[in-house]
Image (cartoon, helix red, strand yellow):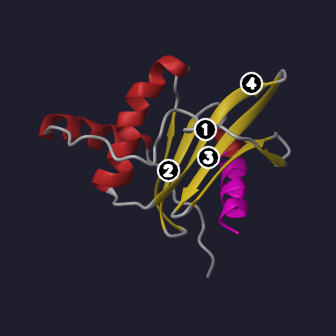
Amino acid sequence: MIAERLLGYLQARLRAGDDGKTLLIGLLGDAPRFAIAAGLRGERDHPRFLIFARYLLYGRHRCDGFALMLPALVGGADVYVMELCLPGDRSVNIVQADGSRRAVDMGTGTIGDLSQRGPALPGIMRRDLDALYEKLALPLPETPA
């Protein structure tokens, strides 16, 4: 159920102009706590984004799960890789432009192990990350009534 809602959210964000951006949605159970869209410049940005994402998930928003949607090129086609991690469950899917998906095995995740909390960050770094969060924040995905 949550995967379908997140796929719908991805399609809506792509229509809203976030195509090519990495989306991160923090979850508490299956309820979204935050959403961001970040323009990463490839793998060289992944280590810094991992620090930022862990801070948002575990330091700022106290999430117990997440959905990470990363743009990729697979077989010459633009796709998104969606990593969904909920308590006790993790899945990774390749999402085609038409919204169809297929499961893949990615080991420790698309940009690293986001399910692991990072080290405590100094206050000045948290302040900078909070300011960055405010710039990248998106409306939350719809939750069922």
Q: Is residue 84 left or right of residue 24?
A: right
Residue 83 got which mark? Answer: 3
Mark 2 highlights which residue?
138
In terms of secondary structure, where does tag 4 sit?
A: strand
Of circles 4 and 2, the one toward us is 4
Span shown in magenta: 1-13
Of circles 2 and 1, the one toward us is 1
Q: Are marks 2 and 1 in contact (CB under 8 Å)?
A: no
Measure how far apart labels 3 and 4 are at the Cα level: 16 Å
Residue at screen point 52% across, 46% down: 24
Of circles 3 and 1, the one toward us is 1
In terms of secondary structure, where does tag 2 sit?
A: loop
Q: Is residue 3 magenta?
A: yes
Give the x, y percent position of residue 93: 73, 45
- Give the class, few, some or many, for how many residues have Cα within 10 Å of label 3's Cα (few <14, many ≥20): many
In terms of secondary structure, where does tag 1 sit?
A: loop
Mark 1 highlights which residue?
107
Residue 126 appears in which quarter of the rendering? top left
Residue that sits furthest to the bottom in the current view: 145
Mark 4 highlights which residue?
73
Measure how far apart labels 4 and 2 are at the Cα level: 24 Å
Q: Is residue 134 visible?
A: no
